[in-house]
């Protein structure tokens, strides 16, 4: 695994924004879907994702910079030294005539005092055993999944292409909100202690007239002035398709009608409601006739809605 700074083409002093910008540029350039048939593109894409995963995590980046973690995200064991002063593995023959220094006296609480001959580790004595054999889980990978408003509201099964090139099907829960995350266990990068996870961030595409608030669906419904004055039966959209609703007589802009059970279901299957806010809209044509009617109405039935609302 190459140095992550080299992979992303940034300096070791690069800021978080510089790392993020470099990752986005390279991920777009080397995405397998945009480079069909090109050899080694998948390996390069995995390398870019692994480098970003390490450098975008402040704790991992600090460990890597200190030499405590390798480029693959695996933690390194503390260095061990032979009597020659070089780093070495547990070669017991190399210590056969070694005279323990103060470090062993400190390490074992004086059990092996200075000047005692060291003849090798006893059972359970190796102070680095747990660190050397510790298994490290592989790094997580991150992916964005775009879904429609209807898919997020009702729930759906979608296919996700992971950085590894593997394609899996995920269940988008009903009522999923924009930027919520799904964790796919064991679908991340490999490590000595097993695979990491895949974090899928849901991006919900906006709907032209629906909005979701918890389990309830909200919308604004335009109505003609005569429908609002006289009352009418009109068609209104819902997640399940259009339904007929009744506009009461003398309905005003801002009046809200409630459609029970037309919202989003919770995990137990109980659905929220849909709220329809009325908006009275004047016609584009016939303005002259309407103006004459309004003049007559104003003369015979004057009223001040602002005074009634307490505004003036």
Image (cartoon, rainbow, N blue to C red):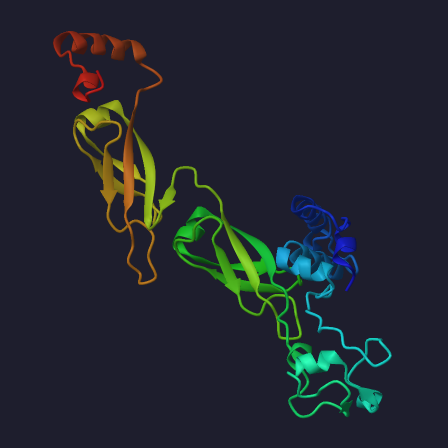
Q: Give the farthest residue toward the right.
A: 84
309 left or right of 45 in image: left
> Is 95 in front, or is 91?
95
Q: Where is residue 266 in the image (x, y as percent from the top left)?
A: 33, 58
Give the residue drawn at x 17%, y 26%: 250
> Is 67 in front, or is 308?
67
| Vertical placement of residue 33 versus 250, above or below | below
Q: In which quarter of the image is residue 7?
A: bottom right
Q: Can residue 68 be seen in this view?
A: yes
278 left or right of 13 in image: left
Q: Give the farthest residue toward the front.
A: 114
> Is 206 in front, or is 288?
206
Q: Which quadrant is the N terminus positioned in? A: bottom right
307 left or right of 135 in image: left
| Vertical placement of residue 216 versus 221, above or below | below
Q: Where is residue 10 in the image (x, y as percent from the top left)?
A: 76, 48
Give the residue drawn at x 33%, y 41%: 218
Q: In which quarter of the image is residue 101?
A: bottom right
Q: Which quadrant is the C terminus positioned in? A: top left
Give the residue drawn at x 64%, y 83%: 109
Q: Position of residue 238 (x, y in %)?
A: 33, 45
> Is 130 in front, or is 181?
130
């Amino acid at each position: 695994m190459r140095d992550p700074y080299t992979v992303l083409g940034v300096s070791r002093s690069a800021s978080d924004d510089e790392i993020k910008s470099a990752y986005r540029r390279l991920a777009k350039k080397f995405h397998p879907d945009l480079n069909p048939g090109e050899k080694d593109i998948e390996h390069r894409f995995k390398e870019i994702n692994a480098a970003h995963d390490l450098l975008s995590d402040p704790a991992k980046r600090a460990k890597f910079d200190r030499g405590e973690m390798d480029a693959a995200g695996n933690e390194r064991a503390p260095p061990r030294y032979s009597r020659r002063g070089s780093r070495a593995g547990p070669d017991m023959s190399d210590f056969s005539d070694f005279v323990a220094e103060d470090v062993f006296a400190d390490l074992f609480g004086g059990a092996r005092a200075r000047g005692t001959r060291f003849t090798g580790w006893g059972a359970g004595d190796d102070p680095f055993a747990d660190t050397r054999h510790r298994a490290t889980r592989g790094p997580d990978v991150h992916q964005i999944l775009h879904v429609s408003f209807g898919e997020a509201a009702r729930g759906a099964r979608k296919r996700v292409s992971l950085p590894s090139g593997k394609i899996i099907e995920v269940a988008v829960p009903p009522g999923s909100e924009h930027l919520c995350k799904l964790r796919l266990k064991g679908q991340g990068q490999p490590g000595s202690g097993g695979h990491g996870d895949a974090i899928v961030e849901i991006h919900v595409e906006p709907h032209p007239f629906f909005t979701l608030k918890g389990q309830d669906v909200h919308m604004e419904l335009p109505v003609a002035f005569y429908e609002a004055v006289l009352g009418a039966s009109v068609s209104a959209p819902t997640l399940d398709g259009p339904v007929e609703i009744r506009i009461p007589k003398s309905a005003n802009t801002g009046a809200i009608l409630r459609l029970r059970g037309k919202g989003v279901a919770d995990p137990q299957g109980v659905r929220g409601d849909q709220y329809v806010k009325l908006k009275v809209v004047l016609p584009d044509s016939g303005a002259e006739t309407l103006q004459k009617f309004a003049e007559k109405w104003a003369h015979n039935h004057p009223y001040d809605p602002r005074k009634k609302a307490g505004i003036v």
